[in-house]
Amino acid sequence: MRGVIMHGPGDVRVEERPDPTIEAPTDAVIRIVAACVCGSDLWPYRGADAPDQQLMGHEYVGIVEEVGDEVRTVAPGDFVVGSFVISDNTCPICTAGYQSRCVNGIFVDGGIGTQAEFARIPHADGTLVATPGQPDDDLIPSLLAASDVLGTGWFAADAAEVGPGKSVAVIGDGAVGLMGVLAAKQMGAETIIAMSRHVDRQNLAREFGATHIVEERGDEGVAKIRELTDGLGVHSAIEAVGSQESMMQAIRSTRPGGHVGYVGVSHDVELPGGELFFGLVHLHGGPAPVRRFLPDLIELIWNREIDPGKVFDQTMSLDDAAAAYSAMDSREAVKVLLRP
């Protein structure tokens, strides 16, 4: 089968990989219907990490081809959505709602790689969720979004304790940040501030529910957010980048007693103890337990109550993966959907 392999920073190739097979009785093999490039894929692409023939891709929807003898919740022919972390969904960490840190967890990126034609999914019962039937083609981008960016934005809003009547600042205008805006709207936030300097992303943020756009950064950005919140700062901040600047922007924009939900993959972030102590804000985040939210998100999408698939502004063939990475790296695309 064909699959995307990153040989080094900026070096993305589509190559032949072995076809996956059932290796354990809890496995499923799925045919990938749609995958995509994630903002987190750009960290190794830009050299912040050290990829070496890394199997790429962790967002996926597909059709079950084959299952192991112990798989009970999905069957051949089912259309399924999976999380970007393999989980058994039965260990104490999973049952507490943190499936992304399952004791048997495996990150799909690197270990499996779903920017490919097929994938073997271990712990299929704990990882995959079947849709109510075969989806209409126009629902596939939204279901794909649920596999990571929607679930991650949703977790960020949940971790930030977004709720009715609250004010929210979203730091990061990539796909996850935009999904954080959508989630905040669904959770009833009254004031939703999207921090963005790009007109196309600003327009999409407004479409998803943003009430205000702030282009300023640093101290000027904090001042602007406080101006919009009676000088207090927001109740909730969503950090969706993973840099020192974005994390401090989130913390400093949040009022005492407020909450920061951070889901940007952290790169060299260091938190000043004194500022944390006197800031009096709650911090919660990390790799999103997407599996916790998948059933509800699939239902919202299936009933056409939300349309997160709008975050995909380009669609390419799997064979054009290198161009997809380049387009996202240069911000010519918000998010690229790949069709095998």
Image (cartoon, rainbow, N blue to C red):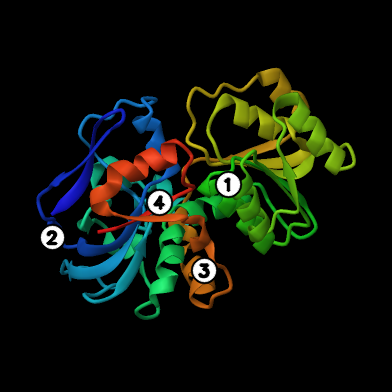
Q: Earlier in the sequence, mark 1 or mark 4?
A: 1
Q: Is residue 70 left or right of residue 49?
A: left
Gap in Å between the C-alphas at discs 1 and 3?
20 Å
> How many numbered markers are drawn?
4
Residue position for label 2: 22
Q: Earlier in the sequence, mark 3 or mark 2?
A: 2
Q: Is residue 161 left or right of residue 1?
A: right
Q: Earlier in the sequence, mark 4 or mark 2?
A: 2
* Amino acid at pointer 1: Gly
* Amino acid at pointer 4: Val
Gap in Å between the C-alphas at discs 4 and 2?
30 Å
- Mark number displayed over residue 336: 4
* Amino acid at pointer 3: Asp
- The local secondary structure at tag 3 comes to helix
Within 10 Å of the Cα at label 1, are there few (<14), some (14-19), or many (20+) other Cα atoms?
Answer: many
* Amino acid at pointer 2: Ile
Q: Quadrant of the N terminus?
A: bottom left
Gap in Å between the C-alphas at discs 3 and 4?
24 Å
Q: Are marks 3 and 4 in contact (CB under 8 Å)?
A: no
Within 10 Å of the Cα at label 4, are there few (<14), some (14-19), or many (20+) other Cα atoms?
Answer: many
Q: Quadrant of residue 261?
A: top right
Q: Quadrant of the C terminus?
A: bottom left
Residue position for label 3: 296
Give the percent coordinates (x, y) of residue 306.
57, 68
Q: Is residue 261 left or right of residue 151?
A: right
Residue position for label 1: 177
